[in-house]
């Protein structure tokens, strides 16, 4: 969409254009400095949109503009088939779009959020990204994250692998936040080693909202993708509800712990991998050990016949029986406390294992770890052959079992891989960091 002729005439009068860095002086005596953005699909054509230095978008009606001081002229990148060539200076980072709130707008007729921004539009909204990296864009999906599945994980992994193989120093995956930790965990297992970080990011608030967290999350994700010393699958999201700092969580440890807060993601049973100071463009590494950049190794594939079941009081064993009879290849159970279920469910789990269907037990407390040696029910489950999930949270155990079962259906091999730490998803000693929101 184009601005009105009045806007274009005034921009031309002062030698300004889209992406110019300008200072606008208004009739009321205010001065606002920022970058001129393209006009969005909706809104008044007489309102000029400016990206303010604080990251917020400001709309100024053309009749309120007294004059424009041009600070810097920027020429928009050339596009080929809708996707720009790598633009900007510095190391190359590939942005892979899958959809989610970060690529959504509010429909002001219904009040609902829906996927609407193209990756190109989103990229144009944040020209600052060009100052830190040479960016290449790849539109993979345009879906809400609840529609993500193991088949799409495989497609995602293929796209990431091609990007890394082509020489990218980092990959950023734009993803809906609701299931981002599932996907980030899945990629951690699919890439046992990598020459480039795989950084997932998104936003809790749609990118057209003034309070959106999308800019800082994207900026930090790109920064981490090219500057981080570690080459793991990670999540970059706000560390607090305020701007200024973004946490880098391991994909296998991260979990969305709040439905709406900007700092919804926490590292479970572990400290974050690092923190990014937005103003200083600095990465502070918190982890004592990590996977460094090395040779990329990609082990593709996920089994889509794996179930994740939450145990609840009164649950019947027939829930497990149903999955067995439907031909599921593996089951992850969220047990209570140390990893317990009722007598009825225990017996159905035993039947599943007898039929060569691996069952992994995790704890629905999220924090802490499974211990099948404390109470009788745990000992009974252990004797049946249940695989203890250690201190993995359930979603990571689900992603891992899906990846493992694509590699092998041998019960012994499945157990061996599930209890082996492959991507820092398991530890011998559980940390208390972030239990009660950051209190050690």
Image (cartoon, rainbow, N blue to C red):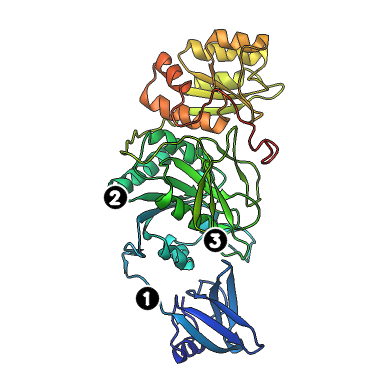
Residue 18 against residue 273 in the figure, above or below: below
Q: Determine the image quadrant of residue 432.
A: top right
At 50% from the left and 30% from the top, the residue drawn is 425
The residue at which mark 1 appears reads as 75
User: Residue furthest toward the left?
Assistant: 166
Q: Nearer the viewer, residue 435 or 315?
A: 435
Circle nearer the N terminus (3, 1): 1
Q: Can residue 147 be seen in this view?
A: yes
The residue at which mark 3 appears reads as 279
The residue at which mark 2 appears reads as 167
Circle nearer the N terminus (2, 1): 1
Q: Determine the image quadrant of residue 393.
A: top right
Answer yes or no: do the residues labelled 3 and 1 have beta carbons within 8 Å? no
Mark 1 Cα shell of 10 Å, populated few (<14), some (14-19), many (≥20): few
At 43% from the left and 60% from the top, the residue drawn is 119
Q: Can residue 172 be seen in this view?
A: no
Answer yes or no: do the residues labelled 2 and 1 have beta carbons within 8 Å? no
Label 3 element class: loop
Circle nearer the N terminus (3, 2): 2
Residue 212 against residue 305 in the figure, above or below: below
Q: Where is residue 121 in the image (x, y as percent from the top left)?
A: 45, 65
How far is the residue under mark 3 from the one under mark 1? Answer: 25 Å
Q: Where is residue 250 in the image (x, y as percent from the top left)?
A: 50, 39
Q: Residue 211 carries which label?
A: none
Q: Which of marks 3 and 1 is in front?
A: 3
Q: Where is residue 256 in the image (x, y as percent from the top left)?
A: 60, 42
At 49% from the left and 67% from the top, the residue drawn is 125
């Amino acid at each position: 969409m184009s601005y009105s002729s009045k806007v274009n005439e005034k921009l031309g009068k002062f030698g300004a254009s889209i992406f110019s860095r300008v200072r606008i002086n208004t009739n009321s005596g205010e001065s606002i400095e920022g970058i001129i953005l393209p006009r969005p699909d909706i809104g008044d054509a007489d309102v000029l949109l400016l990206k303010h230095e604080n990251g917020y978008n400001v709309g100024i009606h053309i009749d309120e503009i007294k004059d424009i001081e041009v600070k810097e002229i920027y020429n928009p990148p050339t596009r080929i088939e809708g996707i720009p060539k790598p633009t900007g200076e510095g190391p190359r980072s590939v942005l892979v779009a899958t959809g989610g709130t970060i690529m959504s707008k509010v429909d002001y007729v219904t009040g609902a959020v829906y996927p609407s921004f193209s990756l190109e539009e989103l990229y144009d909204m944040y020209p600052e990204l060009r100052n830190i990296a040479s960016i290449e864009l790849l539109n993979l999906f345009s879906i809400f994250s609840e529609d993500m599945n193991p088949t799409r994980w495989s497609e995602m992994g293929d796209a990431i692998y091609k990007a890394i193989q082509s020489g990218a120093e980092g990959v950023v995956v734009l993803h809906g936040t609701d299931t981002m930790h599932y996907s980030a965990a899945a990629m951690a297992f699919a890439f046992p080693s990598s020459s480039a970080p795989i950084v997932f990011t998104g936003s809790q608030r749609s990118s057209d909202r003034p309070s959106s967290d999308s800019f800082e999350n994207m900026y930090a994700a790109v920064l981490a993708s090219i500057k981080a010393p570690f080459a793991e699958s990670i999540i970059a999201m706000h560390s607090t509800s305020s701007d200024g700092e973004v946490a880098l969580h391991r994909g296998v440890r991260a979990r969305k712990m709040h439905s709406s807060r900007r700092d919804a993601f926490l590292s479970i049973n572990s400290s974050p991998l690092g923190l990014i100071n937005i103003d200083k463009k600095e990465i502070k590494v918190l982890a004592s050990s990590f996977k460094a950049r090395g040779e990329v190794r990609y082990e593709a594939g996920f089994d889509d016949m794996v179930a994740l079941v939450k145990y609840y009081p009164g649950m019947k064993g027939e829930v497990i029986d149903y999955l067995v009879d439907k031909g599921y290849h593996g089951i992850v159970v969220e047990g209570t406390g140390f990893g317990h279920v009722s007598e009825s469910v225990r017996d159905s789990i035993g039947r599943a294992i007898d039929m060569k269907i691996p069952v992994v037990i995790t704890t629905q407390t999220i924090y802490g770890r499974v211990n099948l040696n404390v109470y009788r029910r745990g000992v009974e489950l252990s004797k049946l052959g249940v695989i203890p999930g250690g201190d993995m949270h359930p979603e990571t155990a689900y992603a891992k079992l899906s990846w493992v079962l694509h590699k092998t259906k041998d019960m012994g091999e499945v157990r061996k891989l599930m209890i082996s730490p492959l991507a820092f998803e398991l530890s011998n000693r559980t940390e208390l960091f972030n239990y009660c929101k950051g209190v050690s």
